[in-house]
Amino acid sequence: MRFTVALSTALLAVGLAAGPAAANTPSPSASASADGSAPTQAGTSFRTATEIKQGQSATASGSTGDYLYWSFPADVGQRPTVKATVKLPRTHGAQTWQLDVYDGLRRRQACQYGADPRPVAQDASQAELACVLRTVRGWAEPWSDDPLPGTYYVRLTVVDLGASDLGQPVSAEVRVDSKDIGGASAVDGSLGKPLVPGIAVKSAADQGGSKTAALSSFGRNDGWSSGWWSDRWVWTGIGAVLAALAGIGGYALTRGSGRPSRVPPGV
């Protein structure tokens, strides 16, 4: 009996001593989930692209010659702008960096503004690249490559450098911002499903399966392609009112004051 009491007292003392130490030890999973900081690494392919949000700056470290991939969502009426800054080694030769943007079907999207690719002078401290995409549309013809709502991929890599510079460490920072264009570039129509990888898997899950889309977190709370309404309807209504007023004014001017004075009475 005395041995049992002594053993229990010893275990209690050990537990009290280890408690503060265990409490002071951070949990990697808890800190990662509670911390809302931007990603600090990039993917190496389309399938492993790191998800980032618009208005969020993501960083990554790599080597010259690596392909760095990120992905972000874009919806109808938005004109995304992708900016990348690459910090280069202290000594290096002339290089050429390229920033490519692909849509959910992995079709390369042309930049409306921005130099692509970007040559970098010898021993320059950094390379700055930018790509302003066209306004995302609600629908497009099957043969076109117009930007549609869904997932977009960013690929950053060097395309021309000397053999001695291959494999040198570099760090990159990528940021995506969008401007809501609205009715100035609105197109009637809507897309049934956004171009998000894994959407077919999610559709199958709706029929009784248990799988979910790989990038289901890219969905918006209010849905994609919010509806048929756009500010073009306001301008259309204003134009219709102005056209009606112009028609009434033109009729009043051409109608005259009544019967011409030169026509005899009774005719």
Image: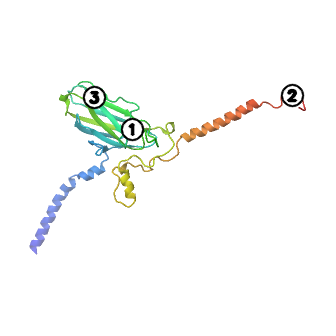
Q: Residue 147 carries which label?
A: none
In the displayed image of the protein, which residue is found farthest to the left?
3
When asked about the image quadrant of residue 87, the answer is: top left
Instruction: Say above or below: 51 vs 84.
Output: below
> Which is more foreground, mark 3 or mark 1?
3
Q: Is mark 3 on a helix, strand or loop?
A: strand
Amino acid marked by disc 1:
Asp
Q: Position of residue 167 (x, y in %)?
A: 19, 34
Q: Say which amino acid is labelled 3.
A: Thr
Label ID, residue 96 = 3
Q: Earlier in the sequence, mark 2 or mark 3?
A: 3
Secondary structure of residue under mark 1? strand
Residue at image position (42%, 35%) is 134
In the picture as drawn, the residue positioned furthest to the top comes out as 122
Q: Which of marks 2 and 1 is in front?
A: 2
Q: Position of residue 121 (x, y in %)?
A: 26, 24
On residue 177, which mark appears? 1
Q: Name the residue under label 2.
A: 263
* Residue 188 in picture, x, y percent from top left: 51, 42
